[in-house]
Image (cartoon, helix red, strand yellow):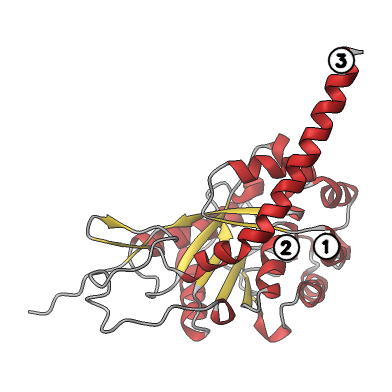
Amino acid sequence: MFVFVTIIFVFVAYTISIKFVFYRYSQLWRHLRNKISTPVYTVGNASFCPTQERSSALLRNSGEDKPRVTASETRALLVTAHPDDECMFFAPTVLKLVESQAAVYLLCLSTGNYNNQGLQRKRELLDSCAVLGIPSDHVTIIDDKELPDDPAVQWSTALISSLILKHIRNYSISVVLTFDGSGVSGHANHIAIYMTLRHLASAGRIPEGCQIFSLHSISLLRKYVSVLELPVSWLLPSDFCCIIGWEEYKRAKKAMLCHRSQLLWFRRLYILFSRYMLVNTFQGITVETKNVKIY
């Protein structure tokens, strides 16, 4: 009897904690959203996190103070490796940004032609983006022999750098979102994007005013307990977080179902159990700025 009562108590307490996280998140979303409107910079030995305002000293080499970017002016670039990455891993973020009237752009660096399905997967990607709310003219799909859908091939860092920087400049991007150093699934193509962006950031090649966030990779156990993982993500530190509810989850699921060529049995289980269908947490990558000295 004691064991039964304990189990019921734990279940009720955990259910309440999940509801509490949803409630608090809805209250704090405006603050969290503003984090992607305040760039991360380092100048000299000073480090600035996403929640800190830029000081006048920080801007002394940038000409004049620029107005703070508002949520409606936020221009986000999602950089992925393959068609279906946008909804399999980033659906909560895309849906929350679109809901906030941010302009969301997608740069997919391959056609996903591993099984000679590139043309079909392009169409599926556009259908998925339509469900998520990304306009087709905001979607760029790269088809280049140096960037094949193949984890055994080392992607060209120079080419990735060129493509990302071109997009940031052409579309006045204020925030770039991508994978972290573990690539969520460990895929080498995912990791190549992170390594390239980290290099660009540390070398001071990212345009001023643009910041970068990498999606947290988590343990296998946390990854496949769906909504039960929510309190854990809420308690652990992150620089940016996106959580969606039931209605948004149904849109994320619909977007995943657009990728018909990829709907094997384990993908269907992924849709049901993956935490990434409900929660995204990100770590900010510090963007170095170069001091320009005139002699």
User: Can you see residue 204?
Assistant: yes
In depth, the one of 11 and 154 nearer the eye is 11
Per the image, label 3 sits on a secondary structure element best described as helix
Residue identifier under label 1: 256
The residue type indicated by label 1 comes to Met
In depth, the one of 88 and 109 nearer the eye is 88
Residue 109 placed where, x, y %? Answer: 62, 69
In depth, the one of 19 and 292 nearer the eye is 19
Check contact, mark 2 vs mark 1: CB within 8 A: yes
**Precedes in sequence: disc 2 or disc 1:** 2
Check contact, mark 1 vs mark 3: CB within 8 A: no
Where the C terminus falls, by quadrant?
bottom left
Q: Residues within 10 Å of mark 3 (few under 14, many from 20)?
A: few
- Residue 40's image quarter? bottom left
Q: Residues within 10 Å of mark 1 (few under 14, many from 20)?
A: many
Residue identifier under label 2: 91
* Mark linked to residue 3: 3
Q: How many marks?
A: 3
**Precedes in sequence: disc 1 or disc 3:** 3
Q: Is residue 3 left or right of residue 192?
A: right
